[in-house]
Amino acid sequence: MLGSCRKIDTLGRVTIPKEMRKKYAITDETLLSITEQNDKIVIQKAIPTCKLCGSEQDVDESIMVCKRCSEKIKNQ
């Protein structure tokens, strides 16, 4: 298990160590989910879901809409 300590900067940011970013394929484009569970702050890769139907399949992350909903909109 990788672990390290980091200070939060004046804007409330914390840096994820390079080794962890590499291991989990986290880039500057990666969407992360920050939640609270049992008095702990949990940071994990977000699962993109369609804003319209909630599907996790074929989601275009730039607009957060799945292919199926996108096709429905185009055909209207």
Image (spheres, rainbow, N blue to C red):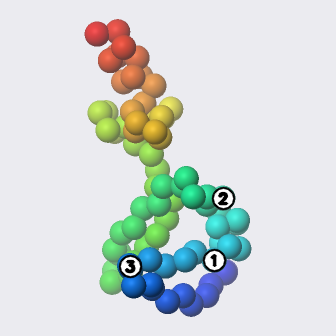
Q: Position of residue 22 (x, y in %)?
A: 70, 65
Q: Which residue is mark 2?
A: 25
Q: Position of residue 26 (x, y in %)?
A: 61, 60
Q: Earlier in the sequence, mark 3 or mark 2?
A: 3
Label 3 neighbour load within 10 Å: few <14, some 14-19, many 20+:
few
Amino acid identity at mark 1: Pro
Q: Which mark is residue 57?
A: none
Q: Earlier in the sequence, mark 1 or mark 3?
A: 3
Q: Which residue is mark 1?
A: 17
Q: Earlier in the sequence, mark 2 or mark 1?
A: 1
Amino acid identity at mark 2: Ala
- Visible residue check, residue 56: no
Query: In the rendered image, which quarter is residue 67 located in?
Result: top left
Residue 12 is left or right of residue 2, and the answer is left
Amino acid identity at mark 3: Leu
| Front position among marks 3 and 2 | 3
Q: Position of residue 37 (x, y in %)?
A: 35, 75
Residue located 46% across and 39% down the image: 62
Residue 44 is left or right of residue 73, and the answer is right
Q: Which residue is mark 3?
A: 11
Q: Is residue 31 above or below residue 13?
A: above
Q: Between marks 1 and 3, how big is the CA–CA gap?
A: 18 Å
Q: Is residue 67 above or below residue 52?
A: above
Q: Position of residue 18 (x, y in %)?
A: 68, 73
